[in-house]
């Protein structure tokens, strides 16, 4: 099942995407913007959203992030593909560690107020340093309260998957050492276009993630190439803290980000960046 949040005729609604282009509305009430998040947090499963007749064409709506207002910061993983870890280490922008390849997952967070949906503009003027960069990432969404979860049990605690573009101000990231400020500018967390439930995407490691900028492919990698896989990330995060239903974990980006070029290819007004995972969809945003 693909869960979406969208605006139709000026009203925010939530529902399911059927056959890639038809929508079944599941909530059009005053709290529809939080309906997908609430479905996950209630831990009632997706049964109540199954069935129903499609009533709206996808082309007639404005897609929003599937969870427009996450309850907590997005958990992110840095340097989690080998080639990207090397390109970041070699770029001169990495002030986090002397390790080229991390010996343990590098964890940081991204503010909820940075979240935008598909086709919404990434506001480059928010970054005074003109160093806006893209990072395609697979996210998994936690389905229930999770503490001290073993690798073998990980997928019992995953609701589904979505896409994040972990947009970054590179010079702010470098200046402040810890990455939170450089990652959390308003509009710097495009998310979507849908959440695909885990029953529909059983083996996410078979998927490929890619990024294009103005139609030019910049990033492409198999999810299977993660340094620290999803079970390792779940075990690491829950070993000392509790994850909550609806928490979003972004798993890292592959090589090909803008800072990896010489000179760097940072995003500028007028560019269009797209992130794709076939099973989830394509997340496209213009740069304003």
Image (tube, rainbow, N blue to C red):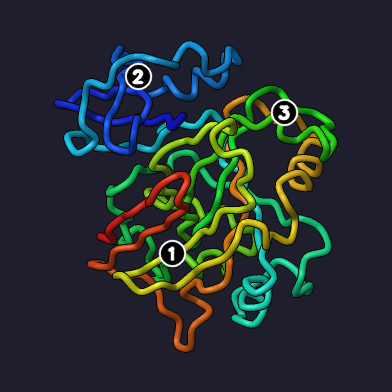
Q: Residues within 10 Å of mark 3 (few under 14, many from 20)?
A: few
Whether 120 is drawn above or below 10: the answer is below
Name, please, the residue furthest toward the bottom: 262
Q: Is residue 32 left or right of residue 164?
A: left
Q: Is residue 67 left or right of residue 74?
A: left
Secondary structure under badge 1?
Answer: strand
Whether 171 is drawn above or below 262: the answer is above
Q: Nearer the viewer, residue 281 or 120?
A: 281
Q: In x, y percent, where is residue 41?
A: 57, 19
Whether 78 is drawn above or below 7: the answer is below
Disc 3 and disc 1: Cα gap in Å?
A: 30 Å
Q: Where is residue 133, by image quadrant?
A: bottom left
Q: Which residue is drawn at the image coordinates 84% and 32% (left, top)?
A: 148
Asked whether the residues under the numbered discs 3 and 1 touch, taking CB atoms below 8 Å apart as contact, a structural biologist would say: no
Asked whether the residues under the numbered discs 2 and 1 touch, taking CB atoms below 8 Å apart as contact, a structural biologist would say: no
Disc 2 and disc 3: Cα gap in Å?
A: 27 Å
- The residue wearing badge 3 is 156
Name, please, the residue furthest toward the front: 19
- The residue wearing badge 2 is 32
Q: Is residue 272 left or right of residue 254?
A: left
Secondary structure under badge 3?
Answer: helix
Q: Nearer the viewer, residue 102 or 43?
A: 43
Asked whether the residues under the numbered discs 2 and 3 touch, taking CB atoms below 8 Å apart as contact, a structural biologist would say: no
Q: In x, y percent, where is residue 211?
A: 43, 64
Q: How many marks?
A: 3
- The residue wearing badge 1 is 211
Q: Nearer the viewer, residue 105 or 110?
A: 105
């Amino acid at each position: 099942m693909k869960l979406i949040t969208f605006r139709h005729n000026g009203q925010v609604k939530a529902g399911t995407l059927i056959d890639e282009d038809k929508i079944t509305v599941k909530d059009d009430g005053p709290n529809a913007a939080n309906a997908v998040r609430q479905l996950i947090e209630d831990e009632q499963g997706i049964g109540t959203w199954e069935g129903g007749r499609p009533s709206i064409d996808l082309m007639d709506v404005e897609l929003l992030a599937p969870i427009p207002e996450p309850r907590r910061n997005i958990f992110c993983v840095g340097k989690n593909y080998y080639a990207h870890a090397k390109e970041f280490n070699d770029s001169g922008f990495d002030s986090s560690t002397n390790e080229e390849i991390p010996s343990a997952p590098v964890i940081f967070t991204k503010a909820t107020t940075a979240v935008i949906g598909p086709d919404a503009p990434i506001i480059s003027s928010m970054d005074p340093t003109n160093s806006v960069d893209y990072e395609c990432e697979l996210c998994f969404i936690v389905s229930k309260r999770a503490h001290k979860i073993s690798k073998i049990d990980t997928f019992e605690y995953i609701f589904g998957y979505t896409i994040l573009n972990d947009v970054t101000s590179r010079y702010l990231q470098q200046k402040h050492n810890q990455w939170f400020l450089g990652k959390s500018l308003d509009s710097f967390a495009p998310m979507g276009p849908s959440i695909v439930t885990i029953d529909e995407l059983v083996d996410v490691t078979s998927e490929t993630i890619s990024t294009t900028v103005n139609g030019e492919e910049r990033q492409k990698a198999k999810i299977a190439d993660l340094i620290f896989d999803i079970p390792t990330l779940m075990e690491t995060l829950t070993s000392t803290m509790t994850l909550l239903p609806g928490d979003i974990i972004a798993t890292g980006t592959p090589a090909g980000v803008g800072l990896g070029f010489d000179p760097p290819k940072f995003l500028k007004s007028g560019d269009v960046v797209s992130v794709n995972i076939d099973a989830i969809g394509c997340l496209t945003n213009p740069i304003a």
